Image (cartoon, grey):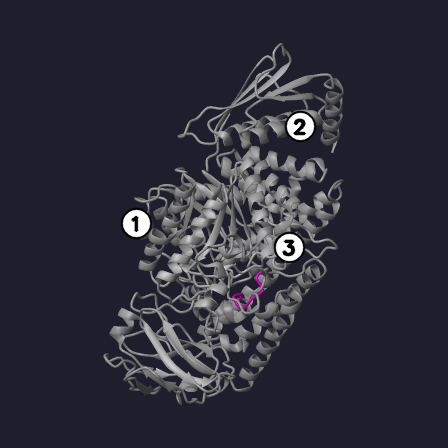
């Protein structure tokens, strides 16, 4: 506290001593970035009482302080600068316009901090990372009526903030202050809101007044960004077309199984060309996955549609300098795409998610190491994308230690030299946070430290740890005017910063945004996670070597040695992190003299993390006992689990009280894509208050089932009865198709000896559709059918990672993977076929009419048709080849 007031006093004295001094800033004001740097320096000096003159050349007979800003081209050393001084003269040399700008900003910061015109300067600096960017989603928390995922036209109704120039200036100023040099705008198909095409005038999907406003704001944005050395990089998905274009030609706006056609290629290429011609300082981020048919199509689309579209625009402008095109490695074969693209376009980058759609580790392995490392070797700069932070929403998160280690991992493990940073929380609700306040908080204000920390280490990740503790302690001490207590606040940030990452990587189902970790998990998800489709690379990629709960329980029962991080270790660690964070934040709480309301919100978040850590730990303790029962068949294990589950509900009740008046929601994407712990369909189940009754019911059901087991003498057989499905009539329109009964001895393919050995009782009245095993693997599967009422098609996916089978619907890579309710396993381990693999059953809901179910290449089974209104109780039929004890998740149904 004393240090803070001493600084104010010293600054005031320096101001009074400097009011008569004059400074001339010399630079080329026709260069936007140098002009912006001159303006920032001028304001800093003027605020300190200097009289400032700006000029293109040094005025004659001027013998007072002089600052000269210049550019000295060095294409091999971009964005670097040098500041040197001699007497009252300071020279700033940038290796390019951005380097000159950063030099001016560096000098401005030093003058602002010390309150004097500096002398004896000899500074050289440059960023480590080539592209350092943030992103804003022009997307919403829910789908628009009549539209699919990612389809959001640029309108005042959808994005009122888009037209707020003051907000853009505030955001761009934050970016340049933190030396970010790229801003990614995410949208499915932005072109129909921003350009008009002579050949496709009907493709525009906004009215004329809105179109003009979009032109104005986008030109304003790109010009203002250019002044600050920032590339605007427009992201789009492929292949998506505008709604009026689709309606005109009788096609869907997006369809994953659709091949490239000359029409949509021509429309997209011309849209890109017009966009390049119209807006300066703009690049592209291209997602080939999610709405594209095959890898061959990815290559063809990128090289024959997208890149030619950019080059045509440059040619019409008479420009040879290539804007950046960033290829997302998501859901494509980036190596094949880049090998085809680099010979025809040089300014290419690749990007891939850092820890998926979460933040879990600074020790990425397996896929999160191998894939980015391979991308970094393709002949271009690789950018690490800190994507949707699904496990951090909505509490505050800004652990400098975790962030610095993560940036080092990007360099040293993944081979990345660029950063693409998502908002810390509420990505889908930009520009606001989830905090429940009278006036909604803006993300850039609440999460200032998130942006500052990532930017600081993207510029230089090699900073000394002890010096960083001092640096951030001072930053927080100044922000809250609490002096030395800033170190306690830093400790609270860094202790809570370990909780969500450790819990997700150890107990989670997915690092994707279909899981909202901080809303908790159900017991069934802990004791049988694979029924909920654990993403194949999740467990091996997201942290140090360790064991998941079911493996730990098996090893413990068999007396086998454990490896790496274990579940008991992790829950003890997160409990301790929560306890230390609470102690630290309380130690600071009596010294806060500024931003008091924000401190109280941060303090509440610390308590939320502490309650959540204890809630989760008690649930894991209960789950370990339930899994032990799987092997012991001792009902005492289940009875011992009950007190832990009761404590878990008590801690969640406490968490509900802490969040009820503090947060509007936990997860900002409030759609059916949110699956874990429970569906987010229609904006439901987004608060702790909504989840609490589910967890209380889970406890009640468990108690009931334990009592029933006790009454039956621990006989499980009578406890596992599910409704037997009745078949419905469907007209199959495929030629020469046969059906097969779901019973023992029936062949599932017409060209294979594979026969059913066991089938779940609830499926025994149904009949499947018999396809060719060979043709499924070579060509995929298409079921053409007609129905007079709504129907659910039961589809069997083989539970294996073999290249011969079709992967089940996966929201991590396909945003349309739940458009017919197919994203979750309905019945796990429902069928055994010797020589193949256990079968998990999913369902696809279809309305009356004629349809085609189009599935990709690989083995898959069409198992039958049931009424569309039939409720399928999600469960595990337990038919598998694993000698791994009995199924236990039924105890919670």
Q: In this view, does 266 lie above or below 48?
A: below
Residue 862 appears in view = yes
Picture residue at 52% right of the left edge, 82% below the top: 871
Q: Mark 2 points at which residue?
A: 44
- Residues at marks 3 and 2, CA–CA distance in whole angstroms: 33 Å
- Which badge, 3 or 1, is on the more N-terminal residue? 3
Residue 563 appears in view = no
Picture residue at 47% right of the left edge, 49% below the top: 275
Farthest residue in the front direction?
A: 198
Q: Is mark 3 on a helix, strand or loop?
A: helix
In this rendering, position of residue 788 left or right of residue 9: left
- Residues at marks 3 and 1, CA–CA distance in whole angstroms: 41 Å
Picture residue at 46% right of the left edge, 67% below the top: 248
Nearest the viewer among 753 and 609 is 753
Q: Which marked residue is nearer to the observer: mark 3 or mark 1?
A: 3
Residue 674 located within the stretch drawn in magenta: yes
Q: Which segment is the magenta one?
A: 669-675
- Which badge, 3 or 2, is on the more N-terminal residue? 2
The location of residue 119, given as percent across then percent down, is 60, 17
Q: Is residue 513 above or below residue 858?
A: above
Q: Main secondary structure of the magenta part?
A: loop
The location of residue 92, given as percent across then percent down, is 53, 22
Q: Mark 3 points at which residue?
A: 160
Q: Name the residue under label 1.
A: 340
Quarter of the rendering containing residue 548? bottom left
Are there few (<14), some (14-19), or many (20+) residues within 10 Å of tag 3? few
Picture residue at 39% right of the left edge, 72% below the top: 884
Q: Is residue 712 above or below residue 346?
A: below
Are there few (<14), some (14-19), or many (20+) residues within 10 Å of tag 1? some
Asked if the residue at tag 2 contacts the one at tag 3, i.e. Cβ–Cβ closer than 8 Å, the answer is no
């Amino acid at each position: 506290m004393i240090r803070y007031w001493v600084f104010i006093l010293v600054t005031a004295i320096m101001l009074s001593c400097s009011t008569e001094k004059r400074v001339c800033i010399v630079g080329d004001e026709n260069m936007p970035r140098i002009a912006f740097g001159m303006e920032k320096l001028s304001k800093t000096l003027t605020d300190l009482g200097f009289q400032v003159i700006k000029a293109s050349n040094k005025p004659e007979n001027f013998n007072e302080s002089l600052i000269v800003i210049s550019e000295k081209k060095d294409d091999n050393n971009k964005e670097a600068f040098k500041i040197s001084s001699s007497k009252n003269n300071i020279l700033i040399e940038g290796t390019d316009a951005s380097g000159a700008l950063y030099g001016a900003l560096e000098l401005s910061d030093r003058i602002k901090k010390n309150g004097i015109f500096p002398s004896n300067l000899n500074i050289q600096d440059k960023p480590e990372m080539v592209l350092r960017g943030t992103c804003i989603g022009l997307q919403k928390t829910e789908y628009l009526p009549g539209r699919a995922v990612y389809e959001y036209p640029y309108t005042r109704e959808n994005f009122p903030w888009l037209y707020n120039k003051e907000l853009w200036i505030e955001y761009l100023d934050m970016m340049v202050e933190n030396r970010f040099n790229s801003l990614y705008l995410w949208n499915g198909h932005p072109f129909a809101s921003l350009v008009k095409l002579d050949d496709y005038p009907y493709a525009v999907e906004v009215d004329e007044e809105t179109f003009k406003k979009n032109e104005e704001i986008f030109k304003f944005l790109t010009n203002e960004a250019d002044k600050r050395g920032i590339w605007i990089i427009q992201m789009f998905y492929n292949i998506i077309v505008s709604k009026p274009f689709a309606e005109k030609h009788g096609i869907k706006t997006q369809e994953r199984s659709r091949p490239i056609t000359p029409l949509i290629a021509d429309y997209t290429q011309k849209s890109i060309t017009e966009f390049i011609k119209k807006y300066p300082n703009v690049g592209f981020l291209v997602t080939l996955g999610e709405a594209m048919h095959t890898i061959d199509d990815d290559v063809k689309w990128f090289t024959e549609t997208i890149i030619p579209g950019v080059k045509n625009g440059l040619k019409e402008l008479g420009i040879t300098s290539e804007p950046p095109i960033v290829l997302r490695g998501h859901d494509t074969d980036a190596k094949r795409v880049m090998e085809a693209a680099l010979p025809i376009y040089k300014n290419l980058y690749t990007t891939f998610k850092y820890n998926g759609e979460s933040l879990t580790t600074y020790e990425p392995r397996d896929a999160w190491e191998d894939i980015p490392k391979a991308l970094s070797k393709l002949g271009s700069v690789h950018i690490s994308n800190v994507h949707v932070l699904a496990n951090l929403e909505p509490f505050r998160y800004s652990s400098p230690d975790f962030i610095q280690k993560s940036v080092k991992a990007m360099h040293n493990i993944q081979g990345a030299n660029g950063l693409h940073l998502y908002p810390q929380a509420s990505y889908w609700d930009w520009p606001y946070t989830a905090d429940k306040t009278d006036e909604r908080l803006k993300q850039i204000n609440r999460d200032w430290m998130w942006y500052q920390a990532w930017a600081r280490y993207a510029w230089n990740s090699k900073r000394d740890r002890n010096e960083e503790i001092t640096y951030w302690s001072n930053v927080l001490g100044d922000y809250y005017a609490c002096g030395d207590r800033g170190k306690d606040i830093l400790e609270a940030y860094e202790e809570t910063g370990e909780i969500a990452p450790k819990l997700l990587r150890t107990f989670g189902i997915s690092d994707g945004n279909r899981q909202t970790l901080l809303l908790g998990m159900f017991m069934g998800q802990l004791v049988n996670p694979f029924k909920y489709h654990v993403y194949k690379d999740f467990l091996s990629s997201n942290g140090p070597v360790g064991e998941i709960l079911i493996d730990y329980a098996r090893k413990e029962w068999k007396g086998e040695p454990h490896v790496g991080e274990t579940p008991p270790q992790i829950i003890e660690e997160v409990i301790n992190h929560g306890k230390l964070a609470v102690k630290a934040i309380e130690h600071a709480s009596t010294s806060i003299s500024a931003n008091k309301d924000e401190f109280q919100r941060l303090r509440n978040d610390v308590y939320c993390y502490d309650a959540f850590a204890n809630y989760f730990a008690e649930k894991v303790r209960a789950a370990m006992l339930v899994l032990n029962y799987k092997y012991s068949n001792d009902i005492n294990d289940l009875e011992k689990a009950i007190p832990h589950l009761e404590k878990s509900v008590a801690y969640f009740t406490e968490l509900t009280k802490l969040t009820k008046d503090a947060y509007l929601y936990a997860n900002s994407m409030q759609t059916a894509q949110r699956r874990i712990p429970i569906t987010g369909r229609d904006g439901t189940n987004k608060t702790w208050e909504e989840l609490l009754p589910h967890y209380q019911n889970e406890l009640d059901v468990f108690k009931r089932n334990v009592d029933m087991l006790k009454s039956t003498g621990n006989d499980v057989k009578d406890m596992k009865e599910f409704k037997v499905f009745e078949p419905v009539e469907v007209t199959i329109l495929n030629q020469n198709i046969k059906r097969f009964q779901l019973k023992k001895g029936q062949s599932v393919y017409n060209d294979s000896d594979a026969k059913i050995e066991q089938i779940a009782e609830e499926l025994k009245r149904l009949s499947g559709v018999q396809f060719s095993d060979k043709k499924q693997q070579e060509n995929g599967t298409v079921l053409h059918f007609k129905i007079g009422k709504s129907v659910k098609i039961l589809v069997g996916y083989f539970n294996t990672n073999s290249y011969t089978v079709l992967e089940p619907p996966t929201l991590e890579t396909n945003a349309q993977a739940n458009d017919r309710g197919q994203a979750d396993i309905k019945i796990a381990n429902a069928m055994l076929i010797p020589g193949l693999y256990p079968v998990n059953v999913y369902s696809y809901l279809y309305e009356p009419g004629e349809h085609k179910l189009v599935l990709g290449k690989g083995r898959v089974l069409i198992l039958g048709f049931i009424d569309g209104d039939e409720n399928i109780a999600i469960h595990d039929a337990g038919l598998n080849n694993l000698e791994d004890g009995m199924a236990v998740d039924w105890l919670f149904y």
